[in-house]
Amino acid sequence: MNIKLLTATLIACSTLFGSAAFAADAKSSQAEFEALKAEYQKSLETAAKSSDIRGGLVKACSVKYKTAVSSKALTQADVNKLCSCSVTAEGQVTTAETWELQSAANAKNKTKFEQLQVSLMKKQGDSIKKCVGTALDQKLTKLTQQAQAAAKN
């Protein structure tokens, strides 16, 4: 459940970067997104079958940032650090937290589910922020602001 949550969040961020900041044309952006999405899914499947699942998840995560690397918005080292920190933060979600989230979903308690989701995302976000360090965090914040500004135009 949490993998899906983090995946959706990261795909959304990747889409924001990919389509708003780096793609000039909507059709090519959509095609690029679909290709990256397929590559990401294949990477996740490969990671699940790997003898180094964590390493596979880091590689899968980096697929989502190919556009940012090719446009030189981020370096491959930045992406590797971000993805390593993201996978570590995701791995720190406890089984009890997963059960609580799944229980709220099963009970169709949207309010509790959303509260738990926000709490987990904040916890993971704080962990990632601490792990990546100030310089990369500031760089990511700046890129996010640029992407949001571009999306408004």
Image (spheres, rainbow, N blue to C red):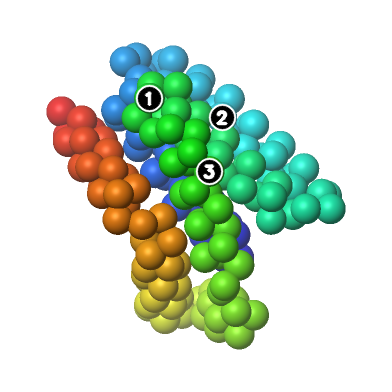
The answer, for residue 107, to whether it is visible in the render is: no
Chain-order first, disc 1 or disc 3: 1
Viewer-nearest residue: 120 or 105: 120
- Type of amino acid at the residue the image marks with label 2: Leu
Q: Mark 1 highlights which residue?
A: 72
**Label 1 Cα crowd, 10 Å radius (few <14 / some 14-19 / many 20+):** few
Residue at 26 percent across and 49 percent down: it is: 138
Chain-order first, disc 2 or disc 1: 2
Residue at 60 percent across and 79 percent down: it is: 94
Image quarter in which the C terminus is found: top left
The alpha-carbon separation of the residues under discs 2 and 1 comes to 17 Å
Q: Secondary structure at mark 2?
A: helix
Q: Are marks 3 and 2 in contact (CB under 8 Å)?
A: no
Q: Mark 2 highlights which residue?
A: 36
- Type of amino acid at the residue the image marks with label 3: Asn
Residue at 62 percent across and 37 percent down: it is: 40
Chain-order first, disc 3 or disc 2: 2
Q: Position of residue 25 (x, y in %)?
A: 34, 14
Residue at 55 percent across and 53 percent down: it is: 84
Viewer-nearest residue: 106 or 131: 131
Q: Tell me if 145 is positioned left or right of 96 in this view.
A: left
Q: Position of residue 47 (x, y in %)?
A: 74, 48
- Type of amino acid at the residue the image marks with label 1: Lys
Query: Up-down: is 11 above or below 37?
Result: below
The alpha-carbon separation of the residues under discs 3 and 2 comes to 17 Å
The answer, for residue 113, to whether it is visible in the render is: yes
- Pair 2/1: label in front: 1
